[in-house]
Image: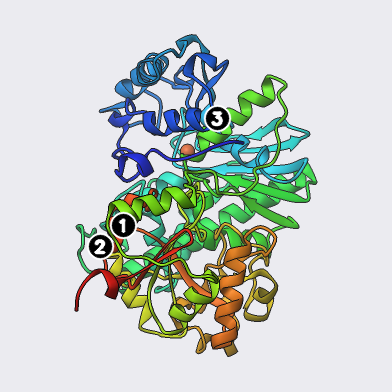
């Protein structure tokens, strides 16, 4: 695995395109060109290009389709090889292969995970004609055991609720999950009648009239207890159905490990419930579990089918990176005063201990939606005001939590319930009661935190930063949230970092080995 990156990081347009079916012609041209450059390949060198949707599988006029746009989406998908050959001159369009959407998701988990054998569960909004896949990977071979046909879809159910609550569907689902922790699952009984597993590996989602439970909200309209209770009820029911599906899958496979992908696998509250209450020893979620990860899965699936060696993913740092010299040149061009401290970790830890907000830019960018200490905003977890402060920097809703990174060996002392290795921030953990007042900025209203565990061997600089911070404050925990401002994709290149530093109240910018202080750049 040489490179993986999302188009949004290049085009600076969130998700690369609008989350609507008629945007299907827009392909990740800039990201694809960069991946080739990183590999030292030209488009004509490629002997396989995966497209993670197979238009042949679409049932014309089938259930669950958006009839206004379905034919357009299918037409665009059929023409994808030509679109790609236009975007990447020299590419032979005949090398483009259609990989069924859920096979691509499944491969992005089962073939990328560090196991030779795993049960794999994929749930998302929809692919061509289904919304789910349950299967078994053994030595790279997938056996599909169940797949739920549309219109039944756990992902679409969650998307519908997202829209009902005034958020952007197919984009803002994580806000519904955050809102759920403010409510009580008062409508769980009703949801159990409407959404249920069918005992054959699949499930049903009956049509739901959301307005019976809480009135529809417009964009930015204030939510009430009813809305939070509805979110809590749907979240709880989703978790229960996923547990049923996982139990069925475990009975069928006897596998020790569960691997997951698909948009629903970004629901870290549900993931923890599967880990804590489900039958599998370990649950592994691919960091780019949403549709962006189907690029990786599609490629792995083709490589495996071709007999090429496929190895587990080395981590999420598969995006763009710059050398120290290149980063210095960016700062020189911007005529920004900077220093290169002898001990970067100690210098930054001292700034954090003094309650300064740090924009932290190190190494190659993360693949997937989470900041994992490469393009992160860091802050002191002990100041309860820092939740508000960072949500202000990022222009986010104040009900949304911010998350901690923690030294892996310290995690069990502070956190419980979720898996103790959580390098991709895709699980939530309970914060032990005696720690809640010590790290208030990262404790969500329900007493949980979505942690990233940092291992010395994998991330030595980050581990040193956490140690230095602990030495100054007694806290082996630092606030970590993604480095971006409202509605924008995460910072990716040094220009984005400088622009973010220039426009948001961030105290210190750390660009590789260099430190830029706000006071030195902006007078008074
Ligand atoms: Fe998907």
Residue 392, can we see it? no
Residue 39's disc number: 3
**Disc 3 Cβ-to-ligand 1 distance below 8 Å:** no
Identify the residue under disc 2: 502
Q: Give the crowd class for mark 3: few <14, some 14-19, many >=20 residues within 10 Å.
A: few
- Residue nearer the viewer, 124 or 80: 80
Rendered location of residue 485, percent (x, y)? 29, 59
Q: How far apart are marks 2 and 3 (CA)?
A: 33 Å
Numbered badge on residue 498: 1
| Residue 231 image offset from top left, x and y in percent | 39, 63
Mark with earlier residue (2, 3)? 3
User: Of marks 3 and 1, which one's residue comes earlier in the chain?
Assistant: 3
Q: In which quarter of the image is the N terminus?
A: top right
* Rendered position, 142 above or below 426: above
Indicate left or right for 109 with 207 as reference. Answer: right
Label pair 1/2, CB-CB below 8 angstroms: yes
Q: Are marks 2 and 3 in contact (CB under 8 Å)?
A: no
Q: Please determine whether, in this image, residue 43 is positioned above or below residue 365.
A: above
> Ligand 1 near label 2 (Cβ, under 8 Å)?
no
242 left or right of 400 in image: right
Q: What element carries label 1?
A: helix
Say few, some or many: other residues with alpha carbon within 10 Å of mark 2 (under 14 / 14 to 19 / 20 or more). some
Observer-nearest of 192 and 401: 401
| Residue drawn at the location 52% of the way across and 86% of the way down | 436
SS class of the residue under badge 2? helix
Coordinates of residue 380 in the picture (x, y in percent): 45, 79
- Res. 199 mark: none
């Amino acid at each position: 695995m040489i490179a993986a990156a999302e188009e949004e990081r290049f085009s600076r347009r969130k998700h690369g395109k609008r989350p609507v079916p008629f945007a299907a012609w827009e392909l990740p041209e800039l990201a694809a060109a960069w991946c080739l450059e990183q590999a030292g390949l030209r488009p004509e060198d490629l002997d396989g290009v995966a497209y993670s949707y197979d238009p042949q599988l679409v049932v014309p006029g089938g259930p669950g389709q958006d009839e206004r746009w379905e034919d357009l989406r299918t037409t665009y998908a059929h023409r994808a090889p030509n679109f790609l050959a236009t975007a990447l001159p020299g590419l032979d369009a005949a090398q483009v292969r259609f990989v069924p959407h859920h096979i691509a998701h499944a491969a992005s988990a089962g073939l990328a995970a560090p196991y030779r054998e795993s049960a794999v569960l994929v749930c998302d909004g929809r692919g061509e004609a289904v919304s789910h896949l349950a299967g078994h990977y053994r030595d790279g071979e997938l056996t599909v055991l169940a797949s739920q046909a549309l219109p039944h879809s756990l992902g679409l159910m969650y998307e519908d609720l997202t829209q009902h609550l005034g958020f952007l569907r197919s984009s803002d689902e994580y806000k519904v999950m955050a809102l759920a922790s403010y409510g009580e699952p008062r409508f769980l009984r009703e949801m159990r009648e409407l959404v249920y597993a069918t005992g054959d590996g699949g499930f049903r989602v009956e049509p739901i009239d959301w307005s019976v439970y809480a009135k529809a909200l417009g964009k930015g309209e204030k939510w009430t207890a009813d809305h939070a209770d509805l979110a809590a009820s749907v979240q709880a029911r989703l978790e229960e159905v996923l547990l049923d599906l996982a139990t069925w899958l475990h009975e069928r496979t006897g596998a020790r490990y569960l691997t997951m992908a698909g948009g629903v696998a970004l629901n870290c509250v549900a993931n923890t419930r599967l880990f804590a209450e489900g039958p599998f020893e370990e649950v592994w979620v691919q960091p780019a579990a949403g549709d962006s990860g189907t690029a990786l899965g599609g490629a792995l699936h083709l490589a495996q089918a071709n007999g090429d060696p496929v190895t587990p993913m080395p981590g999420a740092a598969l995006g763009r990176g710059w050398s120290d010299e290149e980063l210095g040149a960016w700062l020189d061009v911007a005529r920004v005063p900077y220093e290169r401290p002898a001990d970067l970790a100690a210098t930054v830890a001292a700034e954090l201990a003094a309650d300064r907000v740090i924009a932290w830019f190190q190494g190659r960018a993360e693949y997937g939606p989470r900041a994992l200490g490469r393009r992160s905003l860091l802050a002191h977890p002990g100041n309860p005001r820092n939740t508000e402060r960072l949500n202000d920097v990022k222009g986010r809703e104040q009900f949304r939590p911010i998350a901690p990174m923690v030294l892996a060996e310290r995690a069990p002392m502070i956190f419980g319930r979720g898996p103790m290795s959580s390098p991709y921030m895709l699980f939530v953990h309970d914060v032990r009661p005696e720690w809640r007042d010590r790290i208030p900025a990262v404790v969500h209203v329900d007493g949980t935190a979505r942690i990233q565990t940092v291992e010395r061997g994998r991330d030595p600089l980050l581990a040193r930063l956490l140690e230095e911070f602990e030495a100054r404050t007694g806290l082996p925990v630092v606030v970590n949230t993604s480095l971006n401002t409202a509605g924008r994709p995460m910072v990716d290149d040094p220009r984005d970092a400088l622009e973010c530093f220039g426009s948001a109240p961030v105290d210190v910018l750390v660009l590789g080995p260099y430190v830029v202080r706000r006071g030195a750049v902006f007078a008074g």
